[in-house]
Image (tube, grey):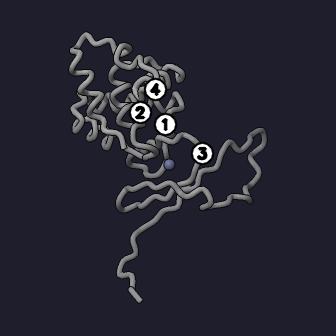
Amino acid sequence: MSNPLPLQAMLNARGASLDIASVAGRRGCPLSDLRDRLRRSGLRPTRQRLSLGWLLFGRGDRHLTAEMLYDEAMRAKVPVSLATVYNTLHQFTEAGLLRQLALDGSKAYFDTNPSEHHHFFLEDEGQVLDMPDCGITVDSLPDAPEGMEIAGVEVIVRLRRRHGARQS
Ligand SMILES: [Zn+2]
């Protein structure tokens, strides 16, 4: 688990005129990897993108809403607005770094693993879990409408806690 604070410490230590490339320039540095990843995706590695990307991608695969990332940014003392968090998440999604999940009409979840996979969604708690690889087989799909082909299949299995579950 990566701690996001060192990035901010580095940024703060160099002051406002920081050249982020000089901090991130060393090979094998996670920050350097992140900068390269943004560049390869066609995004300029601005300080805000690096800071939010550091928070997003530094902890393995996970699923976040803009509000969750904003809370993490506030705790890590990253100076961003909620609007910037929204914009950055959508830019990352368009660049293929994130995948937006259609789980809940009221808020968007973003997955740091953009490859196709299936999810459990614990509706009452808004919690998203990756399904194990062997979790589901979809082998009987209808034909796509004329002139179309199936681009992907994502299954969401909605869960709720059992109320009054008996213990035997
Ligand atoms: Zn996922």
Mark found first going from the N terminus, 3 or 4: 4
- Are circles 4 and 2 on residues that touch, CB within 8 Å? no
Secondary structure under badge 2? helix
Structural distance between the alpha carbons of marks 3 and 4: 28 Å
**Mark 4 Cα within 10 Å, few/some/many (few <14, many 20+)?**
few
Q: Which residue is found at the position 46% from the left and 30% from the top?
A: 92
Residue 86 in sight here: no
Q: Quadrant of the C terminus?
A: bottom left
Count of numbered circles in the view: 4
The picture places residue 82, in percent across and down from the top left corner, at: 28, 33
Whether the residue carrying mark 3 lies under 8 Å from ligand 1 is answered with no
Q: Are marks 3 and 1 in contact (CB under 8 Å)?
A: no
Q: Earlier in the sequence, mark 4 or mark 2?
A: 4
Mark on residue 116?
3
Check disc 3: other Cα within 10 Å, few if <14, some if 14-19, many if 20+. few
Q: Residue 84: x and y, percent?
A: 32, 28
Q: From the viewer's perspective, is residue 130 above or below residue 51?
A: below
Q: In the picture provided, is 22 more to the left or to the right than 35?
A: left
Q: Is mark 4 within 8 Å of ligand 1?
A: no
* Point 47% across, 51% down: residue: 103
Foreground label between 4 and 1 = 4
Q: Amino acid at mark 2?
A: Leu
The image's mark for residue 66 is none
CB contact under 8 Å: marks 3 and 4: no
Q: Which quarter of the figure is the N terminus placed in?
A: top left
Image coordinates for residue 104, horizontal then vertical, percent: 43, 52
Q: Which residue is mark 4?
A: 28
For mark 1, what is the residue? 98
Q: Secondary structure at mark 1?
A: loop
